[in-house]
Image (cartoon, grey):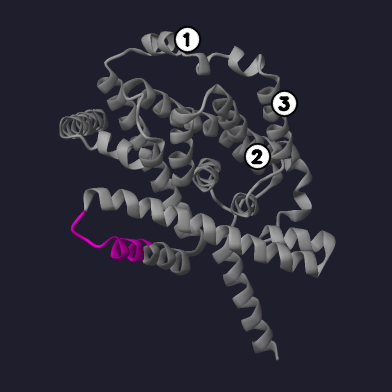
Amino acid sequence: MDRSNHLQDQRKNTFVQYSVGNKNFHTITLMITVLTTAIGGGSMMRIIPNVYNYDIYYIFVVFLGAIKPFLLISILSFRMGPFMNHLSIADTIGSVYGKYPRAITALLSICLCISLTSIEINIISDIIRIYIRSIDHRVITFMVALYLISYTILGGVRAITVSDVLQFIILMTILFLIIKFLFIKTGKSLLEIILILKEEKRFQLNHVFQNNRKLIKLVIHFIGSFFYITPSVIHRLYTCCSPTQVYKVFSLASILGLVIKGCFVLIGILIFIDSPNLVVKNFSSDMWNELNDPPLSSRMVNLCASHMHHFFQVSIA
């Protein structure tokens, strides 16, 4: 009996470590995992075309959406002590409302995570297919899905955390390069772009504030979606060691999330300045084709090489 209880406790501890780790992650690492969980490739490929297609109203929606979930959790963080030992949002719901709400929450969370993961897989596959046209797209999709499933099953939360950090570094590098090359392609400075946008009616502030209908929609959107936080983001809360760390992680994430969403908005604006007549239906493929232009690609390689050379010089010094 003692051996059986020991094995059960060991399996329980192993599953806890697999799910939330040993709660010894650094605050910056947790902040990065929160950001990469909340802001994935789906956000990028949704925001950029919509900024291009819609007006300043959508930009307000993007910035409000960037800070509100993180801000809400950071405000409530010091009341989350009783829930810090839970493994998921289903555990927390179950501890308050009982087993049936817990089961419903778990099922809905699984469905949502499956849909979000499928979006990420499709986006990764589409980008790879642009550069590797000789392989069937179904094979690429299968390989990407197999890779994601394998490292998640084998490594648990630690493997996901490491991949989140790498994903964040890659995302920030790609954003920096895309913005830099779009500035090169447009041949305009930031001040010139601001002056051009001032002449565009749909990018003027009064286009929102003088339109009562859009202003009301903006307020309703902010209030209605303020409490919408995905289970995967909530799960990052349980990997923190204390409510104080939760506050630090989500406060930093709200600031940096605003910067990342701002980069998405800037890319959409720069593409509008450079090519104002793109077809929105084919926007994603047209955008990547623009960035895959040979002269632009060669400049990208040269710039990467120069930055790597500078990095190594600084490291050696």
Which residues make up the magenta segment?
133-144
Q: Residue at x 52, y 32 (%)?
A: 256
Assign a secondary structure to mark 1.
Answer: helix
Q: Where is residue 27 in the image (x, y as percent from the top left)?
A: 56, 42
Q: Mark 3 points at which residue?
A: 216
Disc 1 marks a residue whose amino acid type is Lys
Q: Is residue 138 magenta?
A: yes
Name the chief secondary structure element in magenta: helix
Q: Which residue is drawn at 44% across and 29% down?
A: 52
Q: Measure the C-alpha gap from mark 1 to mark 2.
A: 31 Å
Identify the image quadrant of the N terminus: bottom right
Q: In which quarter of the image is residue 213?
A: top right
Q: Name the residue under label 1.
A: 198
Q: Position of residue 313 (x, y in %)?
A: 21, 29
Disc 3 marks a residue whose amino acid type is Ile
Q: Measure the C-alpha gap from mark 3 to mark 1.
A: 23 Å
Residue mark closest to the camera, 3 vs 2: 3
Between disc 1 and disc 2, whose residue precedes?
Answer: 2
Assign a secondary structure to mark 2.
Answer: helix
Disc 2 marks a residue whose amino acid type is Pro
Between disc 3 and disc 1, whose residue precedes?
Answer: 1
Between disc 3 and disc 2, whose residue precedes?
Answer: 2
Q: Which of 267 and 85 is in front in this view?
A: 267
Identify the image quadrant of the C terminus: top left
Q: Measure the C-alpha gap from mark 3 to mark 2.
A: 21 Å
Mark 2: give few (<14), some (14-19) or many (20+) Cα within 10 Å: many
Q: Name the residue under label 2.
A: 69
Vertical arrangement, residue 99 with respect to residue 78, above or below:
below
Q: Which of 28 and 280 is in front in this view?
A: 280
Specify the farthest residue to the right: 97
Q: Where is residue 242 in the image (x, y as percent from the top left)?
A: 68, 47
